[in-house]
Image (spheres, coloured by chain):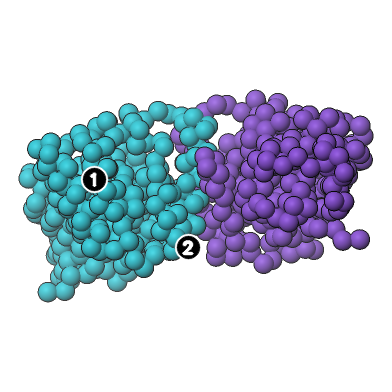
Chain colours: A cyan, B purple
Amino acid sequence: MSKTVKVFACASVGNMSVGFDVLGCALNEPGDIVEMTFTEGSEVRIVEITGDDGKLPKELMKNTAGIAVAKMLKHLNIEPGIDIKLHKQMPIGSGLGSSAASAAAAVYALNKLLSEPLTPIELVKFAMEGEKFASGAAHADNVAPAILGGIILIRKYEPLDVISLPVPQNLHITVVHPDLVISTKEARSILPDSFERIDYIKQSAALASFVQALHTNDFNLLSESVVDHLAEPYRKSLINGFDAAKQAALNAGALSFGISGSGPSVFSFSSSLETAQQVGQAISDSFAHLNINSEIYAGKINQNGPKLIVE
Amino acid sequence: MSKTVKVFACASVGNMSVGFDVLGCALNEPGDIVEMTFTEGSEVRIVEITGDDGKLPKELMKNTAGIAVAKMLKHLNIEPGIDIKLHKQMPIGSGLGSSAASAAAAVYALNKLLSEPLTPIELVKFAMEGEKFASGAAHADNVAPAILGGIILIRKYEPLDVISLPVPQNLHITVVHPDLVISTKEARSILPDSFERIDYIKQSAALASFVQALHTNDFNLLSESVVDHLAEPYRKSLINGFDAAKQAALNAGALSFGISGSGPSVFSFSSSLETAQQVGQAISDSFAHLNINSEIYAGKINQNGPKLIVE
């Protein structure tokens, strides 16, 4: 038994401004690559991690991808020998679902190696176990889009149920990752435990409008719906230059601007690739004025989930 | 100038459990009738009110229909003589948008009399002025469906913008009005000013799922989405026999059960007229066990708004 698969799984934008803790969407880039090989032994090992600047532990149960794989094997009640190589190709702690991408690639790779005993939604559950370790809570708003692709509504957790929302054909997304450090736990603890009723009403109306906009290809409505009355007012203070970047994005023609996950990455929707690219440059230039470097990604929503890399 | 129109405007279900303060839908019955006549004079008078058990004032600026008409005339900057007759054909303080039905019928009638100078959404705004008087706040979740018909999402207030959501063809609604008294103000004051973050997340996911269910004709999803984690836990204590009625409705095949507006009326969705009728009887029987009389209405969502009555 010696077989290898190599899988790319993508970054994702959690919350999407309008859907605090319930929405997420998948990007085409960046993402992580996991290489997984059955070995003769009976041990699961992370034998190599690249691209992490030494930040990630190789110890199986301290690594999100390792935990996800271990939980999945336990569920399947098998003990194969597995060597895992993790190639980080995206920033860690960026608000782009870095740990989710690793966990998604790992469970997807393992499922392929085993001839797909599990359904995609089952894979989401095991990837969530890795997320739980990384962020302190088992959220699905990054792992679900990373595994399923598209724009995902996390309908409920017990049991987990998600909905793939329609993706308008010309919808493009820009993500800019400024070189700033925010911990997910800090970004979470800055939020109040309760929301004002009036803010709830405005935000829930926006979320319902967003779903409507996706179904009707209404980009004006989408633009007015992708707003965040709940988390953004608190979290934007953690992102140096947020307001200026927002203004720059909207001036460049973006339909929206907000925080990706818990930041520091930000994202915009646009109605064409050209605009999405211009918006990315405008946001990046705005951060550059504050001497903050940034990376730009612009393209369509990834509607396919992880990719098997055939060499 | 002597001309009369007679208009029926319908009751409505505000909140619809899943959309606190942002959703409402229109019923085919019950409703109110307003008869409006241009007179030779220059005064606007409410000359007759029937069916209200003497509860409603005829004084123009103390009556929701009167206020709505006065505000609309002021906006149009005209001072015709008008006699208004209001025939209440639905219970007052029932949670079925009684004051909204009167205001909707009145502004619709006036607009007809004047050869329709205003759009439906403008009529909603003036009917809201009447609502403001009745409930202490200018809400649109009853007047908007009463005037526009269908299932309405109140997207935002300043400026007012609403969305007509799709209505699945086989969707039926049952409303049962138990003979209990609740004041809207009391039902509102029993609610906290803020909601727990976790409840917000669950409720917003349900609302997004509900919009998805309407677009995809998915009655299973609709059934799981029409839930209320926010208001129902507080308000159900004001409705004697609520839990038993809910159980009876679900046992009879209802897709959902919840409070209409701020109660005491309750409502269920069903997938056929037959089920909707059986559900109505089951709920009514459940209240009867507590010696509470009730009225049952079962049918489709009203998708047309007010009706001109031609005699």
Residue tagged by mark 1? A248
Image position of A106 (left or right of B130): left
Answer above or below: position of B81 versus A73.
above
- State the residue in front, A75 or B61: B61
Number of marks in the rendered image: 2
Distance of mark 1 from mark 2, alpha carbons? 28 Å
Mark yes or no: residue B10 visible: no
Residue sitting at x 57%, y 26%: B192
Image position of B32 (left or right of A84): right
Residue sitting at x 29%, y 48%: A250
Residue tagged by mark 2? A215
Label 1 secondary element: helix
Answer above or below: position of A215 versus B56.
below
The quarter in which the C terminus of chain A is drawn is: bottom left
Image position of B168 (left or right of A95): right
- Name which residue type carries label 1: Ala
- Name which residue type carries label 2: His
Q: Chain of mark 1?
A: A
Image position of B185 (left or right of A84): right
Q: Residue furthest bottom?
A: A311
